[in-house]
Image (spheres, helix red, strand yellow):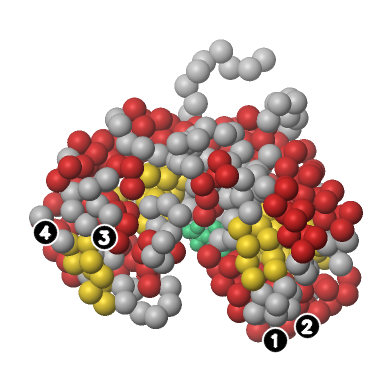
Amino acid sequence: MPSPYKTIIEPHRIKVVEPIRLTTLDERQALLRAAGHNLFGLRADDVIIDLLTDSGTSAMSAEQWAGVMRADEAYAGSRSWFRFEAAVKDIFGHRHVIPTHQGRAAERILFSSAVKKGQVVPSNTHFDTTRANIEFTGAEALDLVIPEGRVPSSRHPFKGDMDIGRLETVLQDREVPLVMLTVTNNSGGGQPVSLANIRAVSKLCRERGVAFYLDACRFAENAFLIKQREPGQGDRPVSDIAREMLRLADGCTMSAKKDGLANTGGFIAANDDALAERMRNLLILTEGFPTYGGLAGRDLEAIALGLYEALDEDYLTYRIRSVAYLGEKIAAAGVPIVEPPGGHAVYIDAKALLPQIPASQYPGQALACELYVAGGIRSCEIGSVMLGDGAPMELVRLALPRRVYTQSHVDYVVEVVADVCSRRAQLRGMRIVEQPSVLRHFTARFAPLTA
Ligand code: F0G
């Protein structure tokens, strides 16, 4: 019988704790100035609540730590490799499993083996490393998310869906070696892709003889959001939905730093034998032998367990609820967010929150800096600083590490964000004083503009 109580609790208790150093406002002002007003330049010890990313920041379970001790560090054919391979095959369902040190290594190997100059690779929205790895081969990375996916206030339940009409046109007019779908759509607000849309993309690709790959980093969160939001899917076990999603694709690239619940790792899953052989040859060149691919046996073991833990329905219920809770509370305080909150993060619409700051003065950066000074919260600008001038949206992402923070941590974040929102009229923009030629968001230095 289901529980009669409404409160959703963290379905784990705490065995090991890590202290958080509580800095003061004056300290944070000085620390931010020293970091050139760039939150990537801070020491993590100077952050109270770190919402920079959900990648590689998960807390591992007691079982995973036990797996770390059980792991086999043999160079070739380690026991941990066979556990890892069996887990990926069971959940993902593809014939070949190729381990890599993280997601972008899987992307580099897939695209250098399957994509050529002049071709085009469509996706709902490519993550920035995916786009960069496609462009590095001389091919074009094309984003074909549905129009609702670019409107922060739209409440469409599956804002990560691919625009099927536009995909059909591209498949007709251009040379497409493979189509991708990012689940969930991180760069578009962490929004899920519906099962109906994945089925439609899969069918279209099969009809046209084009390969179909998922960027599957957050596959479990996407599957849970399908169960919650898609008509007819509510009664299915999440692991069933996930298995169907993954099997609709010919392969996947995966960063195990997200729904692998591990601190590092990744892999490629693929059905194409000839392609898998080319990828394994490239793997040996730069990542390692095909039974470890740049990972320690203990990483393989942690991922093999983490993939199953990520599909646990009690865990996912808590996970998705804590993201929705943060989104609902700050929206109620008047903060415009990308609606509805998705799987791993809440995205604040800085353009709508700070209309007095034009995009050229980086409203997202200004907001992210103020959240740090006010409450020691580290977030991530996803707007003109990260994506370049002319970015489609000016967002600030509050990404929740998995199983790390408690509800009172989230309540604290809500209080800080609401306080900053109440002072929104006083916030001023920033200018860049120093920047590198590529990926400027990591190292650029900023100065606040005065009124
Ligand atoms: N694909 C997506 C959708 C991602 O979100 C990321 C990483 C990657 C691929 C690359 O994986 O980091 O293991 O090489 N996203 C992190 C983030 C960095 O903060 O969103 P990786």
In percent of width and height, residue 68 lies at 60, 61
Label 3 vs label 1: CA separation?
A: 44 Å
- Judging by the rendered image, the residue that carries numbered circle 2 is 281
Mark sitting on residue 337: none
At mark 3, the secondary structure is helix
Residues tagged 1 and 2 counted as in contact (Cβ below 8 A): yes
Residues packed near mark 1 inside 10 Å, few (<14), some (14 to 19) or many (20 plus): few
Where 230 falls versus 31 (above or below)?
above
Residues packed near mark 2 inside 10 Å, few (<14), some (14 to 19) or many (20 plus): some
Earlier residue among tags 2 and 3: 2
Identify the residue shown where x is 34% and y is 73%.
443
Which amino acid, by three-letter code, is at mark 3? Gln
Identify the residue shown where x is 86% and y is 67%.
272
Label 3 vs label 4: CA separation?
A: 11 Å
Which amino acid, by three-letter code, is at mark 4? Thr
User: In the visual, does 263 lie left or right of 140?
Assistant: left
Label 4 vs label 1: CA separation?
A: 52 Å
Earlier residue among tags 3 and 4: 3
- Judging by the rendered image, the residue that carries numbered circle 4 is 450
The quarter of the image that holds ligand 1 is bottom right
- Judging by the rendered image, the residue that carries numbered circle 1 is 285
Query: Exactly how many numbered labels are in the figure?
Result: 4
Residues packed near mark 3 inside 10 Å, few (<14), some (14 to 19) or many (20 plus): some
Earlier residue among tags 4 and 1: 1
